[in-house]
Image: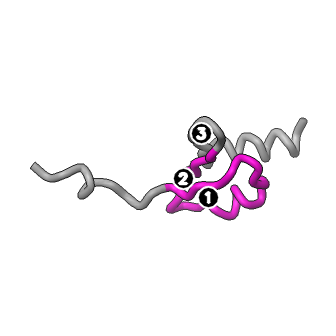
Amino acid sequence: MKPVAEYMEKPFPVILEDASIEEIAHNIDHQTPAILVKHGSGFDIITKSDLIFFLTKQKNP
């Protein structure tokens, strides 16, 4: 049986919770569908879908 490490892909980028939308958008692309957001009690995740939803909402309030 193969170890889990052989099935893993590259890790998601990590940004701090005070990062800008521009920084998030710069780090998400077709090969990186999500970003980990580091904060005091751990991590959250922002996906490409989250970013699209947020930007769409900003254009059409």
Q: Is residue 57 on the magenta stretch? A: no
Q: Position of residue 28 (x, y in %)?
A: 61, 58
Evaluate if marks 2 and 3 touch, with contact meaning CB atoms under 8 Å apart. no
The kind of residue tagged 2 is Pro
Give how far apart the Cα atoms at labels 2 and 3 are. Answer: 14 Å
Label 2 CA crowd tier, 10 Å (few <14, some 14–19, many 20+): few
Label 3 residue SS: strand
Q: Residue at x 59, y 39 (%)?
A: 44
Magenta stretch?
12-38
Quarter of image, res 53? top right
User: In the rendered image, which residue does mark 3 sit on?
Assistant: 44
Evaluate if marks 2 and 1 touch, with contact meaning CB atoms under 8 Å apart. yes
Point out the image quarter for the C terminus. top right
Tell me the tag on residue 48: none
User: Foreground residue, 5 or 27?
Assistant: 5
Label 1 CA crowd tier, 10 Å (few <14, some 14–19, many 20+): some
Q: Residue at x 87, y 45 (%)?
A: 59
Q: Position of residue 51 (x, y in %)?
A: 69, 47
The kind of residue tagged 3 is Asp
Tell me the tag on residue 33: 2
The kind of residue tagged 1 is Ile
- Left/right of residue 8 with respect to residue 4 in the rendered view: right
